[in-house]
Amino acid sequence: MHSILVTGGCGFIGSNFIRCLLTESGFSGRVVNVDKLTYAGNPENLTDIAEQFPDRYVFVRADICDRSAMTDVFARFAIDAVCHFAAESHVDRSIVAPEGFIKTNVDGTFTLLEVARERADRLMLFHHVSTDEVYGSLGPEGYFSEETAYRPNSPYSASKAASDHLVRAYHHTYGLPVTISNCTNNYGPFQFPEKLIPLMILNAAEGKPLPVYGQGRNVRDWLHVMDHCRAVWAIMQGGKRGETYNIGGRCELANIDAVALICDLLDEILPDAALGPRRGLITFVKDRPGHDLRYAIDSRKIERDLGWTPQVTFETGLRQTIQWYLGHRAWVQRVRTGEYQRWVQQHYGNG
Ligand code: NAD
Ligand code: TYD
């Protein structure tokens, strides 16, 4: 692989992946980052990388649904591998406004697959990044394996499931060299503060209420974003074409316990006598419609076949993540106020 197209590289996981690729993976080629720059895409996440690797990092603002733009990118940069992150990714938004999820996650993936099929002569790999949410919801027992039937419950997970099926079908029908990964919930630096962990860190730091849905008994399996990035790279290097790999943190926590831990760590790192223990900020709010009870991944296949295991424990990763958000207040401020969206408009226009 000499020229990798990373889609959605200005988002949370994509930007961490590009940093991982260029600074620690051993990859010596070029990375082409295609991102539409939605509310969740922030080019500032990679300013240091753009400066450090002017010859090996290229950013193109484009929509993955735009077929002629994608054809142009594949040809202009002689793309020989794809790592596809671009997606609408927030379940709550998908409940309020599902259409954009179908457009980007389904139509966008289809468009990329079609362009990749036209370039099949030089394409070595199309890696598709997906979620464990396609499997639906677990009860108190059991795990999602690569054999678990798909039963998506939200417009987000249904759109990701549809894209997974398309990727699989392009391998089966056209022989496109694909791999797919389904990962559990990620946390870490650069995550947009609409998701549970960064939202709770920032609200707790600022003494604001911590809105826990329902009774907080829903369980998520947490994985540090860098562990996810290393897993994706391991699959891209050694994964068998046509196969799916599940990636999990072996770190199940009920939401209420994750939020309580954030409170306790912040009480230690950022004591505020006037506020009292931050657990007092926890506020139970109306549950999410169709809220999946539990996700948990059986990641024995990637551990056994590719030798990947998570390196970052939840408490260590959470401490680092809290420190990161506390140390990047200007980033948080700009993301929250939409200041970077104004900058994107000035810099790149409305396209
Ligand atoms: P994110 O919302 O932070 O970033 C998504 C990125 O895609 C943004 O930069 C956005 O601008 C870009 N994008 C959106 N629509 C686009 C379009 N039409 N064309 C080009 N770019 C577009 O998401 P994330 O949390 O980084 O997730 C990345 C991928 O990983 C997604 O496919 C998601 O389903 C998957 N995933 C996420 C998690 C998680 O916990 N966050 C877990 C498992 C899998
Ligand atoms: P989220 O970070 O949105 O990820 P996902 O829905 O993809 O798992 O939410 C993680 C869990 O936290 C989920 O069970 C919903 C819950 N949650 C809250 O309780 N309060 C919140 O404000 C948010 C955003 C999520």
Image: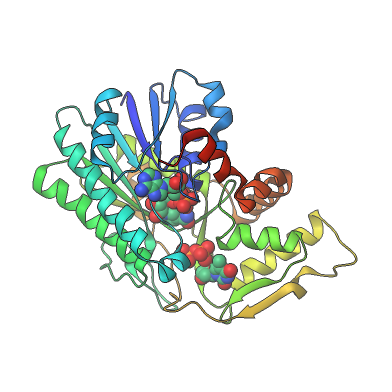
Image-quadrant location for residue 30: top left
Left or right of 23: which side holds 83?
A: left
Residue 317 visible (yes or no): yes
Left or right of 107: which side holds 156?
A: right
Q: Which colour scheme is used?
A: rainbow
Report the front residue among 79 and 308: 79
Q: Tell me the residue at 21%/44% (across/down).
A: 113
Residue sitting farthest toward the top: 55
Residue sitting farthest toward the right: 273
Residue sitting farthest toward the left: 173
Count the numbered circles shown: 0
Residue 144 visible (yes or no): no
Question: In the displayed structure, would residue 171 be above or below residue 118?
Answer: below
Question: In the displayed structure, would residue 293 be above or below residue 175?
Answer: below
Question: In the displayed structure, would residue 116 be above or below residue 283?
Answer: above
Report the front residue among 246 and 163: 163
Q: Could you say where residue 193 lies in the image, as x and y percent from the top left?
A: 59, 56
Rendered-image quadrant of the N terminus = top left
Report the front residue among 240 and 60: 60
Left or right of 265: which side holds 157?
A: left
Q: Could you say where residue 300 lies in the image, as x and y percent from the top left?
A: 37, 55
Q: Could you say where residue 3 lies in the image, as x and y percent from the top left?
A: 33, 25
Q: Could you say where residue 122 lies in the image, as x and y percent from the top left?
A: 19, 27
Q: Tell me the residue at 28%/42% (across/down).
A: 66
Q: Tell me the residue at 43%/57% (across/down).
A: 89
Rendered-image quadrant of the C terminus = top left
